[in-house]
Image (cartoon, rainbow, N blue to C red):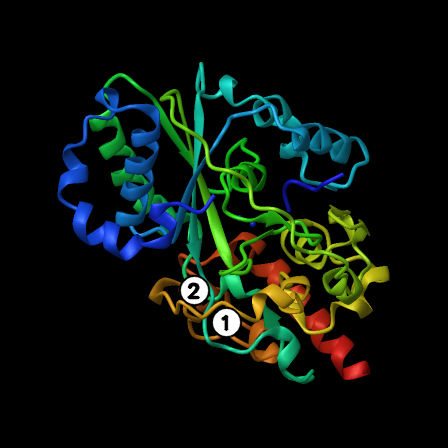
């Protein structure tokens, strides 16, 4: 059973995105998608996405896919913890046609966020320093990606008059990683994140549901093999089995989603993790290869990389509001972030 939730066929667009951006940037604006055959539509739609700044684009069938049944079983086992919205949105997540009637395709876009800073597993534990998940160092990816999606969808609507294009960035009733897998953007790793053979797993996903028919990309075969590095490294043993995550034990869930204080039984396992956790991705061999993109929006802002724990847990509300304005860290809330920073500091000092 795959855990399809807990934020990502080789084609011309994937091999030569720079060439496509430069040669198609003008003409793609005037493409009449309705006049084109379905394979040509797909090629042009992906070229549009690359021109709007995404690093990879693929197209998947709206399903049904086997992972949708896995998701239902995952919910039945209560692995989603307090994330009740997942249960409420289940019918829509499993049937894209309830969002876009007569859905014909799911466009999936990837945006890399890796930087050249060390991994969490490469820095020594320091009682004075904590760790914030890599994805949260800079600007909120929801805001960044939505700014890219809006003009892309406007262009699609102009090129395919009368058709619907509904986008989501990790906040709607869509199984992004499932569609990303079937769009050829990566295989589902044992740590339940998508892995691309060239780009690893450091990327965000966005989806566009549409009733415009297009050809689909082919999924990438699973290359995890016998490796269990991610499973073995998890401090809280959150993986029930390969590809199955019990979110209730995951440090990311405990330090981001959980509204209550981190349970006593998991506090010693936090290590220096104040907000989120990258360990399962940090130890993945496929993440040794990708070059950092150093996209400006995702570079660490002040106090986000290897932060001073005392500064975090004694931070004034005004400082918090200013420092983390437009940051995903705001999701945790002022009091809960301070409380977690204090727990981490006390745990590191105990050794």
Secondary element at image label 2: loop
Does 328 sit left or right of 295 as displayed? right
Q: Residue at x 50, y 28 (%)?
A: 61
Q: Residues within 10 Å of mark 2 (few under 14, many from 20)?
A: many
Q: Quadrant of the N terminus?
A: top right
- Give percent across and percent down for residue 341: 65, 70
Whether tag 2 and tag 1 are in contact, CB under 8 A, the answer is yes
Q: Residue 313: tell me if it is visible.
A: no
- Give percent across and percent down for residue 215: 41, 28
Q: Earlier in the sequence, mark 2 or mark 1?
A: 2
Q: Nearer the viewer, residue 267 or 77?
A: 77
Q: Residue 21: tell me if it is visible.
A: yes
Q: Quadrant of the C terminus?
A: bottom right
Q: Looking at the image, which residue sits at the far right?
A: 265
- Give percent across and percent down for residue 275: 61, 63
For marks 2 and 1, give the CA distance.
8 Å
Q: Which mark is residue 138?
A: 2
| Residue bearing the label numbered 1 | 304
Q: Nearer the viewer, residue 193 or 134?
A: 193
Does 5 sit left or right of 269 as displayed? left
Residue 238, above or below 287 = above
- Give percent across and percent down for residue 37: 29, 23
Residue 180, above or below 286 = above
Does 30 sit left or right of 285 as displayed? left
Q: Which mark is residue 315?
A: none
Q: Residues within 10 Å of mark 1 (few under 14, many from 20)?
A: many
Q: Residue at x 75, y 79 (%)?
A: 348
């Amino acid at each position: 059973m795959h855990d399809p939730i807990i934020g990502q066929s080789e084609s011309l667009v994937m091999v030569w995105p720079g060439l496509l951006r430069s040669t198609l940037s003008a003409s793609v604006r005037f493409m009449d998608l309705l006049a084109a055959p379905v394979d040509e539509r797909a090629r042009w739609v992906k070229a549009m996405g690359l021109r709007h700044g995404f690093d990879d684009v693929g197209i998947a069938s709206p399903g049904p896919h086997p992972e949708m049944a896995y998701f239902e079983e995952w919910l039945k086992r209560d692995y989603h913890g307090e994330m009740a919205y997942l249960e409420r949105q289940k019918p829509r997540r499993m049937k894209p046609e309830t969002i876009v009637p007569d859905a014909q395709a799911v466009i999936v876009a990837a945006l890399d966020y890796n930087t050249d800073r060390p991994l969490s597993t490469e820095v020594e534990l320091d009682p004075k320093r904590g760790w914030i998940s890599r994805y949260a160092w800079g600007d909120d990816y929801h805001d960044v990606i939505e700014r890219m999606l809006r003009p892309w969808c406007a262009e699609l609507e102009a090129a395919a008059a009368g058709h619907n294009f509904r986008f989501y960035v990790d906040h709607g009733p869509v199984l992004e990683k499932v569609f990303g897998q079937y769009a050829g953007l990566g295989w589902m790793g044992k740590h339940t994140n998508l892995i691309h053979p060239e780009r690893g797993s450091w990327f965000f996903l966005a989806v566009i549901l549409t009733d415009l028919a297009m050809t689909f990309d082919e999924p990438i075969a699973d290359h995890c093999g016998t490796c269990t590095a991610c499973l073995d490294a998890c401090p809280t043993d959150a993986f029930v089995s390969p590809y199955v995550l019990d979110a209730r034990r995951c440090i990311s869930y405990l330090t981001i989603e959980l509204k209550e204080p981190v349970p006593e039984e998991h506090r010693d396992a936090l290590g220096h993790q104040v907000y989120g956790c990258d360990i399962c991705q940090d130890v993945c061999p496929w993440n040794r290869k990708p070059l950092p993109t150093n996209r400006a929006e995702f570079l660490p802002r002040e106090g986000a990389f290897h932060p001073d724990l005392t500064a975090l847990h004694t931070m004034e509300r005004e400082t918090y509001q200013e420092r983390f304005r437009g940051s995903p860290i705001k999701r945790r809330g002022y009091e809960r972030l301070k409380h977690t920073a204090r727990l981490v500091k006390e745990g590191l000092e105990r050794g």
